[in-house]
Image (spheres, rainbow, N blue to C red):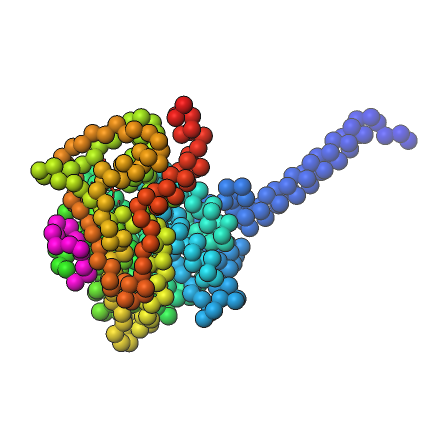
């Protein structure tokens, strides 16, 4: 007997429903699989703390930390904090290119345009350097990283930089340069084996000193900004961790570092931007119309200094939080040894950019800036052959070339 049409319809609907449910299950299953294994989309990867839970990222981090097999002497395994920063990106690249293992850490904060930091990270990614997105105050994250990799060295460059901004946001300096440094040292001191640490201090610790050139043996007890005070505090904190836990610690006093991929908050950078846009620029002068000068130091010279400091750091002696013997505690100036007045910096930029700056000369406000810096670099030269070779004009030419390529569409348009 023939089945009634109603039965056929019901059967057809049921089959369709079963098919639909099956496909939906397959789709959801695949979605779940890819979400668990590849938590971010592959076009704009963003690595973060939670990524460290996924085996796929753990092995990427471990791969990034592994020195090249043909690296002479075995190579270092370096954690670079602030890797998406100006100095951090250049140092990470240089380490990786000579065959060392490098893992980066950066919080990508918005002190200046984070898109520049993400662009630096994209560049690092092409070099084979993995950068974790996270903060140095996040002790659990640091412990996780040290659990994944036995770092031989930490290049600690994460910091709240900038002298003048300290008046606007003092807490950020305490948070990054003091609390953050202590969290990092706490994790380093408990690591087994302990890494050697090289970190960024600053020429600003010389503060109101008047004896030039500045030498590491000079007293540094008159900081003129909160920024400088936090860097000076860092040097004292380094002393403590060296003394109690046997950590090898090297502080590098950087002198106004500039160059391609630089920091937009620094004068040479925003002078370039403002001059191209025909905006006014303020040039500070000292009392009685004295010139203000800086020992501007080119990034490639600084990178050589950082690598030299890492290579000669010497081992930490403790393990698992217990000191076993004395360890190196060092401080070096990394400057250029030839101060240049800010007016001259502007003149060089005018020539390179082929524009006349709208210069406004003002008495230096009470903003934490010092009148001059000038490094004596004989200690770094003696210890690891530090020998800066780039004069300001050569370095700025390279910066301007990069700037015009990086910001080309915007600035070419504004020049018309
Ligand atoms: O060497 C250092 O330790 C420091 O170098 C720079 O600090 P600074 O030398 O003040 O660099 P800029 O902010 O680029 O200023 C350079 C010069 O331009 C002057 N300036 C700045 C801004 C401005 O509008 N006009 C002006 O004449 C400043 O007074 C200073 O003499 C960095 O910003 C700090 O992070 C770093 O630690």
Residue 231 in view in this figure: no
Query: Can the viewer see residue 207?
Result: yes
* Residue at the farthest bottom position: 324
Q: Nearer the viewer, residue 262 or 154?
A: 262
Residue 323: image quadrant is bottom left
Query: Bounds of the magenta span?
Result: 206-217
Check the image and report above or below for 345 versus 409. below
Looking at the image, which residue is at 69% across and 36% down?
20
| Furthest residue toward left | 288
Looking at the image, residue 130 lies above or below residue 331: above
Q: Residue 216 lies in magenta, yes or no?
A: yes
Q: Residue at x 52, y 46 (%)?
A: 39
Residue sitting at 32 percent across and 65 percent down? 384
Residue 18 relative to residue 351: left or right: right
Instruction: Indicate the position of residue 416 as horizontal and vertical percent values.
Output: 41, 23
**Residue 402 at x, y percent in the picture:** 41, 40
Residue 9 locus on image (x, y percent): 78, 28
């Amino acid at each position: 007997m023939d089945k009634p049409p109603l039965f056929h319809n019901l059967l057809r609907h049921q089959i369709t429903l079963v098919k639909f449910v099956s496909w939906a299950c397959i789709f959801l299953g695949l979605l779940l699989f890819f979400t668990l294994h590849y938590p971010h989309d592959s076009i704009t990867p963003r690595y973060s703390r939670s990524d460290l839970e996924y085996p796929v990222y753990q092995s990427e981090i471990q791969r990034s930390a592994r020195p090249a097999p043909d690296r002479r002497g075995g190579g270092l395994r370096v954690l670079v904090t602030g890797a998406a920063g100006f100095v951090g990106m250049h140092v990470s690249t240089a380490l990786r290119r000579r065959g060392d293992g490098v893992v980066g850490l950066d919080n990508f904060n918005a002190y200046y345009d984070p898109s520049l930091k993400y662009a630096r990270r994209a560049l690092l990614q092409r070099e084979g350097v993995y950068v974790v997105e996270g903060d140095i105050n996040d002790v659990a994250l640091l412990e996780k990283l040290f659990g994944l990799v036995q770092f031989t060295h930490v290049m600690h460059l994460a910091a709240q930089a900038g002298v003048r901004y300290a008046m606007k946001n003092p807490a950020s300096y305490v948070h990054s340069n003091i609390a953050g440094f202590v969290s990092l040292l706490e994790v380093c001191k408990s690591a087994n084996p302990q890494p050697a640490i090289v970190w960024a201090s600053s020429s600003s610790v010389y503060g109101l000193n008047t004896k030039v050139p500045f030498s590491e043996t000079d007293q540094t007890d008159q900081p003129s900004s909160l920024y400088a005070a936090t860097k000076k505090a860092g040097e004292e904190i380094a002393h403590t961790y060296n003394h109690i836990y046997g950590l090898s610690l090297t502080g590098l006093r950087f002198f106004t570092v500039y160059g391609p991929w630089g920091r937009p908050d620094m004068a040479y950078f925003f002078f370039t931007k403002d001059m191209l846009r025909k905006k006014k620029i303020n040039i500070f002068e000292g009392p009685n119309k004295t010139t203000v000068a800086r020992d501007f130091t080119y990034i490639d010279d600084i990178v050589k200094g950082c690598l030299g400091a890492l290579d000669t750091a010497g081992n930490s002696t403790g393990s698992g939080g217990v000191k076993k013997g004395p360890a190196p505690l060092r401080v070096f100036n990394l400057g250029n040894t030839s101060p240049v007045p800010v007016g001259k910096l502007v003149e060089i930029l005018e020539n390179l950019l082929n524009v006349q700056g709208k210069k406004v000369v003002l008495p230096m406000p009470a903003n934490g800036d010092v009148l001059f810096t000038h490094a004596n670099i004989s200690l770094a030269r003696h210890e690891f052959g530090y020998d800066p070779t780039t004069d300001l004009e050569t370095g700025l030419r390279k910066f301007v070339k990069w700037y015009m390529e990086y910001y080309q569409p915007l600035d070419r348009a504004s020049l018309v």
